[in-house]
Amino acid sequence: MNLRCTYCQTMFALSRETILAALEQMEVEGLHHYDAHCPKCRRANSMSGERLEKAHTGWREARKEMRKQTAETK
């Protein structure tokens, strides 16, 4: 997911793993947005949960599979 920093206009990307972790954190903590930090100015850019869910459809299934894989490696 490509983003543009609201403050310094630098383009940066969020990987699918980062989006998955953000969605999981939002669900666990009951948040409505995620703060994506710009790599240049390090300021927080607020991302809505809806936008993140659109970028990673099927994230609940991906989370289950990731948990299954980590359980197998232990």
Image (spheres, rainbow, N blue to C red):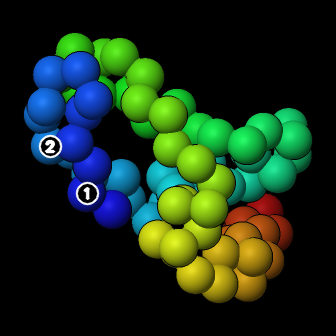
Local crowd size for mark 1, using a 10 Å CA cut-off: few (<14), some (14–19), many (≥20): few
Residue 62 visible (yes or no)? no
The quarter of the displayed image where residue 11 is located: top left
> x, y (%) of residue 65?
72, 81
Callout count: 2
Whichever of labels 2 and 1 marks the residue nearer the N terminus, that label is 1
Q: Is residue 5 left or right of residue 53?
A: left
**Please, what secondary structure does the residue beneath circle 1 have?**
strand
Residue under label 2, please give it.
Answer: 11
Q: Inspect this view and state whether residue 8 appears.
A: yes
Measured as percent of width and height from the top left, residue 25 is found at: 73, 44
59 vs 4, nearest the viewer:
4
Q: Work out whether 45 lies above or below 21.
A: above
Q: Does 53 appear above or below 9?
A: below
Residue bearing mark 1: 2
Q: CA distance from mark 2 to mark 1?
A: 7 Å
Q: Position of residue 17 (x, y in %)?
A: 49, 61
How many C-alpha atoms fall within 10 Å of the one at disc 2: few (<14), some, or many (≥20)? few
At a point 59% along the width and 39% down the height, the residue shown is 34
Q: Which amino acid, mark 1?
A: Asn
Give SS at disc 2.
Answer: strand
Q: Residue at x 27, y 49 (%)?
A: 3
Residue 10: image quadrant is top left
> Along the horizontal axis of the image, is 15 left or right of 53?
left
> In the image, what residue occupies the spot 85% across and 37% down?
29
Work out which quarter of the rendered image holds the C terminus and state it.
bottom right
| Res 6 → quadrant | top left
Numbered mark located on residue 47 in the image: none
The residue drawn where x is 31% and y is 17% is 42
**Which corner quadrant holds the N terminus?**
bottom left
